Amino acid sequence: MTMPEVADIEQLPVSQARAGEPAAWDTLFRRYQLPLYVYVFELVRNEQAGLDIVQETFIAAVKYLGSLREDAKFGSWLFGIAHQKCIQRWRKRREVLLEEIPESPDEFEDGPDDLLIRREQEIEFMNLLNQLPLPQRSVLLLHFIEDFPLEEIARITEAQLGTVKSRLHYAKKSLRKLLEAKNENAA
Amino acid sequence: MKTPREILLARHQAAAPKLDAIRQSTVAAVCDRRPAKLRRSQTTATTIFQTIWLELVLPCRRIWTGLAAVWLLIFIVNISQHDASKVVATKSTTMGMMTTFRDEQKMLNELLATRSFAADAEQPRIYLPKPRTEKFETIAV
């Protein structure tokens, strides 16, 4: 299986899916199934729960596609549904989101690929990612996996734009710091 | 060197077959559904209802229940008061009707009494036109 590209959203057959074409749904789900699963799994840390949430998200997408206003926002809309499902799961299990960093940085200009990781650092990267508080991890995953704009991340996570900027800034900062520290130790 | 995206996706590649199965079952469910137009109209109506239910009612269901209870109480109080006032009003209207009836009867008697005087009064003359031939005869004479 090839790794899904961050495709041009205009190419996705959302309008055909609205018309109920199964082939269009297949294309859409094929495009998002793995990124969505990665996002959900890294939040809930449970394979079966991750698969269940992906399935629930797909079913909800088929059911509520009529509520999607802009076809171009299909990806973020789908991730938004999955995010809500994760929150519902946390609420059921009475898990509390840890937080919070009050201040927002003045500017944010990093891309998702500015952080390059060496092969031997991969496991450390994953461990460090899992050490981040859930809200920071969520924002960072959305940034890494789909390179969503900050506005869309804010919409998915139902947070303020400033809060998203702040979370992303501090998450990347702490991740970079940890990786650098590991590098220095290794050297 | 790899990007975080590449690492994350590669790490979960093992889940791909399960995800394929999920996708296929969901797409099969799409195929089994009814014609698109019918589905869309129904989905929209259901979506609106469910959105209202999920976003407006469910998050503050205790408040809504409280408000409903208050309204129910107001309704019950209103109905009970309405019934009481109706009985009083019915009594008062019966009395009023009797008085009005008596007044009207009195007035009718007075009118009938004055009618005999009116009959004695001079009747207005009724003008009956004569035939034209009779008019000529009187001139000739």
Image (cartoon, coloured by chain):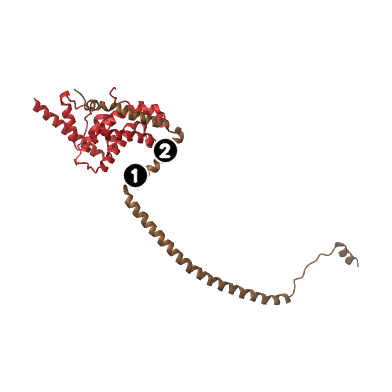
Q: What amino acid is found at the position of numbered circle 2 in the picture?
A: Thr
Q: Amino acid at mark 1?
A: Glu
Dividing the picture into quarters, in which one does residue A17 lie? top left
- Viewer-nearest residue: A34 or A154: A34
Dot 1 falls on a residue whose secondary structure is helix
Give the camera-side residue of A179 and B83.
B83
Which corner quadrant holds the N terminus of chain B?
top left
Q: Is residue A158 above or below residue A71?
A: below
Q: Which residue is rendered at x = 17% and y = 28% of the image? A: A123
Closer to the camera, A48 or B96?
A48
Q: Which mark is residue B55?
A: 1
Q: In this figure, what is the number of numbered marks?
A: 2
Gap in Å between the C-alphas at discs 1 and 2? Answer: 17 Å
Q: At 33% across and 49% down in the image, what residue appears?
A: B61
| Residue A79 in view here | no
As helix, strand or loop, the secondary structure at mark 2 comes to: helix
Give x and y (percent) for residue A134: 21, 38
Q: Is residue A172 left or right of residue B22?
A: left
Discs 1/2, front: 2
Residue bearing the label numbered 2: B43
Residue B69's spot in the image, x, y percent?
A: 36, 56
Q: Residues within 10 Å of mark 1 (few under 14, many from 20)?
A: few
Q: Pick the residue in front: A150 or A64.
A: A64
Q: Quick one: label 1 or label 2, which is nearer the N terminus?
A: 2
- Write down the colour of chain A: red
Q: Chain B is shown in which shade?
A: brown
Pointers 1 and 2 in contact (C-beta within 8 Å): no
Q: Are marks 1 and 2 on the same chain?
A: yes
Chain letter of the residue carrying label 2: B
